[in-house]
């Protein structure tokens, strides 16, 4: 008797779940499938954190990224301690002060922890003044010390805090990806749409152009275009030119996806029906066809962003992309270009880890979205 | 293989090269002022003054007094004669500078291409036949990281690791004592010691994506019914695997050369700059920085030429290897 009831309840639950499945919209089904992709969720969370860091970089940075301090040049990353030299545990983490010494062999300036001075780390601490998004004046920072200094990632050749600079670089590097993809998305949609919808000679010409662009080595091409940029341009102009250069090649894959999907869809009955009902071409493309493959577009956009970020980083690293005073991860890595610098100051490579994490996260997310885009499979 | 297919492909390649030559010419023309102006300025600071006759002679020599399209024709004409122009920075003919670096560029590109496929295909087969095993998981992780790491960053990290823990300097292609030495067996061995790191760095991202493609293709193939039939008939597992599914799965891999090769040339450019390897890509970079316009234009021309010819050859190979490819 008891067993039977359990079975019945299970059965009822099962059918309830089934009913939900049958009545779910396509987007609900996709979300369901996406949630099961653990790595994609990890990627999504990582990207959310990175974008929040980027959007509020003034707040999360410890110092003004341009603040130089010649007393602290090439300071290695400070260690955060919970237990002090006498073995006592502190709930509030702290860093030790720094003592300057010279290396007995090479006579280089080195920094050692001065165990007699402790700088406790506080949240929401008062620090350098800044204007959030150039609008709101504020002086609170997410973390910091009330006195002394906090160099989580060490400092660079003019004593600027690398942690703060990396956080500021997050904003530029992440949004270069978005802006670049936005441009390629527009070009890709228009040309891919024309190509797929009209077919024929137009299609052949556009496909040849795409084949041509894809068969070219991108970095040398980007390099030559970027190097032709006048040296006296304002940072904002440089920024837009670089993103446009990047999207000149980036649109190809998006155009291919749009075209392929359109070729498939335009043969379907509902398109014929719309045409018979008197809808014009653009109405059909925008109102009827586009919603049908928006999920594929999202997947491909997600997968196109890392390419943009890598391109920007590579160009800036070579010194022909973004230039200081703009801070991007590539600009920061430019300081770590030769072996002598890296051998002595390996922490200058830290911004590179952010690049790897970001691209990884986008790839994970894109993979999960790709699986979810086709929820019926 | 049909002759018309070959001809059409050749014609297409010539057209592409023509477009690229225009692009390269634009690259030469884009920077404000020409290199000659800069050159004259340096001459002025060195010698105090330059007589106008000398300037005019230089202008004539390079056809800089002609209208744009005539300059282009002049440039192309000279290129066919083997004269690529003069590098003001190096004070050498551009043709010689490129020719010096061309063999190494080709060797590195081809070796990287071979490395990519030699590593990716076996790993792809392993991952597909051992789906969800530890090895598969391991290679998937490595693959994802390989795709996410910019080649220049990988080069920097390897430079640091080798320098710090092995006391080995990975920059360049030769140790200091061999750079200017004539070719000898010892120099060759020294080259072999320096080659693996750049090849690994350049090839990693391509390898990672081909592993994923190979794995996917082979998995699709293994699910086919003929595999089950063959297995049911008692065909030995190894023979079954290599005789049919692997062969079919490799076909789309051959066609990936079309985008792997541009990727390699691209990656080789930036890696060569970081690791200080004398390739055409590296030459292009220094030329762009110093506005050495003829050198820059010719370098990008040669680089794209290499890529396009490589892709062309791979297309022919594919058409030859797979009779199902339509010659259209």
Image (tube, coloured by chain):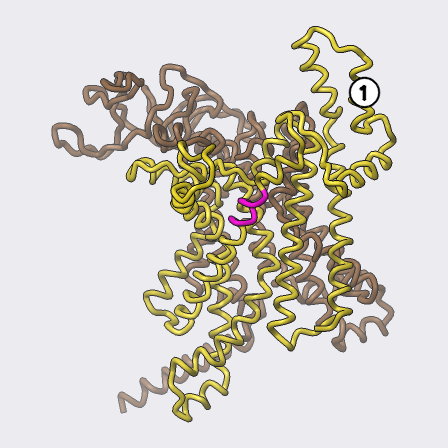
Quadrant in the picture for the N terminus of chain B:
bottom right
For chain A, give the colour: brown
A307 magenta-colored: no
Residue A370 showing in the rendered view: yes
Q: Which chain carries label 1?
A: B
Q: In this view, does B110 lie above or below A91?
A: below
Seen from the viewer's position, the closer of residues A86 and B35 is B35
B105 magenta-colored: yes
For residue B95, side relative to residue A9 (left or right): right
Residue at the spot 69% in from the left edge and 52% down from the top edge: A213
For residue A285, side relative to residue B300 (left or right): right
> Residue A90 placed where, x, y %?
20, 32
For residue A290, side relative to residue B208 (left or right): right
Residue at the spot 78% in from the left edge and 65% down from the top edge: A197
Which residue is tagged 1? B57
Residue at the spot 69% in from the left edge and 14% down from the top edge: B43
Residue interval drawn in magenta: B102-108
């Amino acid at each position: 008797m008891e067993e039977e009831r359990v079975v019945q309840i299970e059965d009822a639950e099962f059918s309830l779940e089934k009913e939900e499945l049958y009545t779910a919209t396509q987007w609900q089904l996709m979300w369901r499938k996406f949630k099961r992709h653990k790595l994609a969720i990890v990627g999504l969370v990582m990207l959310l954190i990175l974008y929040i860091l980027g959007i509020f970089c003034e707040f999360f940075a410890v110092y003004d990224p341009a603040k130089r301090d010649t007393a602290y040049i090439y300071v290695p990353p400070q260690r955060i301690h919970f237990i002090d030299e006498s073995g006592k545990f502190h709930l509030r983490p702290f860093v030790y002060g720094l003592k300057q010494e010279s290396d007995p062999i090479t006579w280089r300036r080195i920094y050692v922890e001065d165990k007699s001075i402790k700088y406790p780390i506080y949240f929401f601490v008062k620090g350098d003044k800044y204007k959030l998004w150039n609008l709101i004046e504020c002086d609170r920072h997410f973390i910091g010390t009330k006195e002394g200094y906090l160099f989580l990632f060490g400092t660079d050749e003019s004593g600027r805090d690398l942690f703060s600079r990396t956080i500021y670089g997050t904003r530029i590097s992440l949004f270069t990806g978005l802006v670049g993809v936005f441009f390629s998305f527009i070009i890709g949609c228009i040309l891919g749409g024309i190509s797929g919808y009209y077919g024929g000679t137009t299609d052949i010409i556009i496909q040849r152009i795409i084949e041509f662009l894809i068969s070219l080595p991108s970095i040398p091409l980007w390099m030559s275009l970027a190097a032709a940029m006048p040296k006296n341009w304002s940072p904002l102009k440089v920024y837009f030119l670089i993103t446009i250069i990047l999207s000149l090649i980036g649109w190809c894959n998006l155009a291919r996806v749009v075209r392929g999907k359109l070729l498939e869809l335009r043969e379907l009955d509902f398109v014929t029906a719309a045409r018979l009902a008197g809808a014009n071409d653009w109405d059909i493309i925008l109102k009827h066809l586009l919603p049908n493959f928006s999920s594929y577009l999202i997947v491909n956009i997600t997968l196109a962003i890392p390419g943009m970020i890598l391109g920007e980083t590579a160009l800036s690293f070579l010194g022909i992309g973004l230039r200081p005073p703009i801070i991007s991860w590539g600009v920061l890595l430019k300081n770590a270009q030769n072996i002598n610098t890296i051998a002595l100051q390996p922490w200058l490579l830290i911004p590179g880890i952010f690049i790897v994490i970001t691209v990884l996260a986008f790839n994970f997310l894109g993979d999960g979205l790709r699986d979810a885009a086709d929820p019926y499979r | 293989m049909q002759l018309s297919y070959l001809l059409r492909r050749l014609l297409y390649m010539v057209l592409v090269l023509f477009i690229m030559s225009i692009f390269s010419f634009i690259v030469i023309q884009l920077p404000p002022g020409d290199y000659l102006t800069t050159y004259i300025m340096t001459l002025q600071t060195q010698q105090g003054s330059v007589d106008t006759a000398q300037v005019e002679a230089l202008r004539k020599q390079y056809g800089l007094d002609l209208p744009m399209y005539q300059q282009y024709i002049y440039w192309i004409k000279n290129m066919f004669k083997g004269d690529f122009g003069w590098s003001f920075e190096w004070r050498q003919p551009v043709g010689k500078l490129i020719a010096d670096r061309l063999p190494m560029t080709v060797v590195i590109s081809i070796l990287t291409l071979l490395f990519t496929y030699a590593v990716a295909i076996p790993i792809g087969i392993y991952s597909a036949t051992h789906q969800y095993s530890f090895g598969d998981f391991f290679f998937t992780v490595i693959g994802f990281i390989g795709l996410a790491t910019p080649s220049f960053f990988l080069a920097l990290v390897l430079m640091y690791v080798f320098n710090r823990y092995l006391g080995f300097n990975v920059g360049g292609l030769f140790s200091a004592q061999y750079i200017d030495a004539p070719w000898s067996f010892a120099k060759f061995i020294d080259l072999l010691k320096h080659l693996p790191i750049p090849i690994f760095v350049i090839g990693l991202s391509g390898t990672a994506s081909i592993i994923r493609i190979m794995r996917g293709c082979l998995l699709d193939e293994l699910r086919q019914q003929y595999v089950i039939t063959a297995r049911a008939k008692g065909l030995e597992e190894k023979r079954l695997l290599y005789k049919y599914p692997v062969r079919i799965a490799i076909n789309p891999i051959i066609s990936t050369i079309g985008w792997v090769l541009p990727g390699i040339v691209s990656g080789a450019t930036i890696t060569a700059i970081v690791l200080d390897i004398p390739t055409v890509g590296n030459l292009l970079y220094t030329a762009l920085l110093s506005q050495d316009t003829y050198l820059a234009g010719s370098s990008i021309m040669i680089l794209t030429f290499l890529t396009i010819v490589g892709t062309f050859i791979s297309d022919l190979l594919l058409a030859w290897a797979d009779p199902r490819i339509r010659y259209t």
